[in-house]
Amino acid sequence: MKENDILERIEIRETVDGRPVDGDAGSRRSTSSSSAATTASSPAASGARKMSTKSMRRASRPDPYIWGIYIMLLLISVVELFSASSTEVHGDNVYMPLIRHVIFLGIGLGIVLWLQRTPYMVINRFAWVFALFSLGLVLLSTLFGESINGAQRAIRVAGVTIQPAEIAKLAVVCLLAYIYGKTQTPGGVSNKGVVTSAVVVLVFAACLVTNGLTNTLLLMVVSICMMLIGGIQWKKFGMVMLAYGLAVVLLMGFKEIAPSTADFDNVEPMQTAMVASAANGAISPVQTGIEAETSGGNLKRSGTWKERINRFIAGVNPDDPITDENRQVVFAKFAQANGGMVGQGPGNSRESARLPLAFSDYIYSIIVEDTGFIGGALVLLLYLLLVARAGRIAYMCSRAFPAFLIMGCAVMIVFQALVHMAIVTGVFPVSGQPLPFISKGGTSVIVMSAALGIMLSVSRFAAHSGNKKEISAEMNALPDDMQAANYSADQQ
């Protein structure tokens, strides 16, 4: 459906047959999907006078707080990416890494501007299509993709490397919002909604696990948060957790009995050799990152997971020698210790020249070195404010679907940021996760920008609880089966 068609359906009913419509009777919010469908298909709704597209755009504005947080993150990204990219500089043009990154940030900004002008109602029409498309990309990368750090997780199109796992996370969020918005009831989520969402998550998790365990766990955690936001009954929640746990046990069991276990031992030496070569200047550190190609093939990942967990449990002591296995962890800790309380100042990082992946998987350590504990805490606060603002907007939404959509996108962005910070600070085992909007990585920047654009669209077009005219217009724009009420808003 075109944007103008949807905007024209978002109407404020002023007269019917030349007579004013009673506000209480004409735009009373439905508390169930059946009554909402009746209201939306009533003769009064079909005979209402539509508001023009231009007037509708003037009537609402995207949330300024989300915009402010986004701009702050972009500014931090430009400064810190330039500071962390010393090992990427080749030749005379020291600005080339920054220019490449700014190009992707510009593309992301264009996506944000486009999506904030697109009514969020479009998502419900394409949620399944988007999900199936992203699942196809994941399968394509698994079967025929380029091997990166021992896992086939990328595909190359016209010289551009695409990370399907990043796209799949946003697709699942949109699909879960569609499912929960359609199956929301006063008591939580219906049985059909719980089963459908659990099956979707398990299918995507099974396909993503060969691309990386962290992405799989992130996907499952985001789905759990969306279930809890939807008020899922504890009995159903327990059953979903049992299904998730059983799936993990079966997967790990399959990995243990799978043939070619000798490949397990080849993954870690290959990775550490790449890191060592990067540190010695033999190759560019980007070759060890999320955009590089290695020759490891589609190796089994459980060996890598075990090694990382074992090293995490053993920890790193101050007297330990620097080896290929602990190089990233040690230099990341050096950078954070060097930052102190106020930091060394932007561009004065010492460890960016020695820390592999300083511009992507470990950029938070460079932020702390440059700006100290205060700067690191500020970045953390920006992400927390983003999810807090999304929660406030979701609480005010009249319908369930936009509430799930904005919260799902916010939780996805913030959880990825928290995981990145936890890995860099040593709270979680080592794994590759970019810091949203800040780390280098074209696919991540574009996907996270799309998620933020969807959040701005919800903030602009979703009706607020208590505004009867807005609620009536929104119900006329949504399909009959997507008009379940946001019951948290009904408690206001």
Image (cartoon, grey):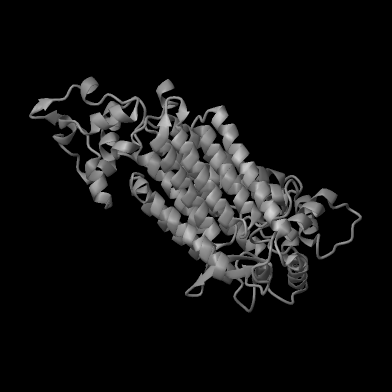
Visible residue check, residue 378:
no
User: Which residue is drawn at the image coordinates 21% and 34% (left, top)?
Assistant: 41
Residue 213, relative to residue 59: is it above or below? Answer: below
Q: How many numbered circles does the render carry?
A: 0
Q: Is residue 211 left or right of residue 67?
A: right
Residue 329: x %, y % from top left: 77, 56
Residue 117, relative to residue 146: is it above or below? Answer: above
In the image, farthest residue toward the bottom: 91
Near-viewer residue (207 or 2): 207
In the image, farthest residue toward the left: 18
Quadrant of the rendered image containing residue 320: bottom right
Residue 17: x %, y % from top left: 8, 30
Visible residue check, residue 198:
yes
Quadrant of the rendered image containing residue 485: top left
Near-viewer residue (5 or 283): 5
Residue 186: x %, y % from top left: 42, 25
Residue 65: x %, y % from top left: 47, 40
In the image, farthest residue toward the right: 319
Tell me the quadrant of the picture where the C terminus can be found. Answer: top left
Near-viewer residue (330 or 243): 243
User: Which residue is drawn at the image coordinates 62% and 64% (left, top)?
Assistant: 290
Quadrant of the rendered image containing residue 20: top left
